[in-house]
Amino acid sequence: MELVRARITALPRRSRRSDGSALAWGNNAFGQCNVPALPPGPTFAEIRAGSYHTVALRSDGSVIAWGRNDKGQCNVPAPPAGSQYVAVAAGGNNQIDAKRGKLFAKLIKNIEVAARTGGGDVDGNPTLYDAIQKAKKSSVPNDNIDRAVKRGAGELGDGVEYHNIMYEGYGPAGVAVMIECLTDNRNRAAAEVRLAVTKNHGNMADPGSVSYQFARKGIIHLAGDVQEDQVLEATIEHGVEDIAPVHDGLLVTCDPSTMVAARTALAEAGLDYESADVEFVSSLKVDVDAENAKKVIALVEALEDLDDVQEVYTNMQISDEVMAEIEAQD
């Protein structure tokens, strides 16, 4: 019998203290545990450890890196004018951190736009309130949220001007796709969306050829063991159209104009909600088999991976049998 030995390398450890300082220990072959001193004022907001280098986000939105730099991994580029870093990652295979960083960036962008549109007063801007709540539930640091509100409200000078653009298309099996973008560069967004769609068995469509199937609805997601009658009792006077079970809780559908009242009523009834968003919901569902479902999912994931894409909506409907088949294949 052949014995296979695995070599285990002890990675250095980094930790952020409650006072915003940082401590590192372990393998220090390239100085990756030598935490640099901070100037007066800023603290460490987030730290990520690679095998031989460390990257840190400071509370003022700047990023520093130290340790091994043979590939330029510690050469932090300056962010575009008017923007700041919101998350960091370290390590060539750290896909979780990369996805987390993209999510943070999109949530921060939503906050900026909400503050720019409706002002920085959370109590008087329900869209901003919901954007902040969504960011907090995704563990976006409070410092990042506060800076985003101030940038959007114009308190930190001129921020980036974002444009809301909606693209339409069709995926495999004729599934309709709506792609909502928030971008500071229309040409870049259009080119990247078109490339992602065509590379994943889809086609772009003319404006209006897909959107007629969709209507804007308020969608409130409640996670956990929530009873439908509790939700109905709390929201019956607030235009709720449907309460549907999902794998991790309930989805409440209502008119967009009553969503704030509905989610407020839920909170007052002691029913915590995961998210409250205005989404595009299709009235014409398309059933797909396992093969086409996987292709559509791949298309959606490719689009969601683009920095300018905020949301992707489809009219795909996957039956329990097809979902079970997909899970068995995976």
Image (tube, helix red, strand yellow):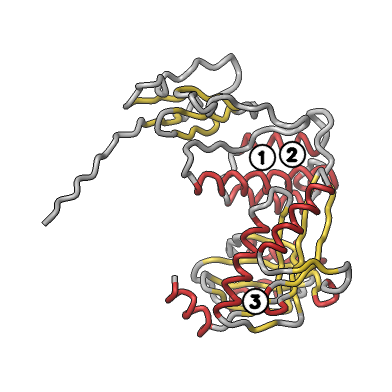
| Image coords of residue 51 (percent x, y) | 40, 33
Residue occupying image coordinates x 59% and y 43% = 101
Residue 149 x %, y %: 74, 39
Indicate which label's residue lies in the foreground, 2 or 3.
2
**Type of amino acid under label 1:** Ile
Note whether 150 is above or below 172 in the view shown: above
Residue carrying label 1: 145
The residue at 58%/51% (across/down) is 137
What amino acid type is highlighted by mark number 2? Answer: Val
Determine which quarter of the picture holds residue 28. Answer: top left
| Residue that carries the numbered disc 2 in the rendered image | 149
Image height of 128 relative to 39, above or below: below
> Mark 3 highlights which residue?
233
On screen, 119 above or below 245? above
Task: In this rendered view, identify the residue nearer to me: 76 or 135.
Answer: 76
Residue 129: x, y in percent? 72, 50
Residue at 77%, 53% in the rendered image: 127
Q: Does residue 113 appear left or right of residue 34 in this picture?
A: right
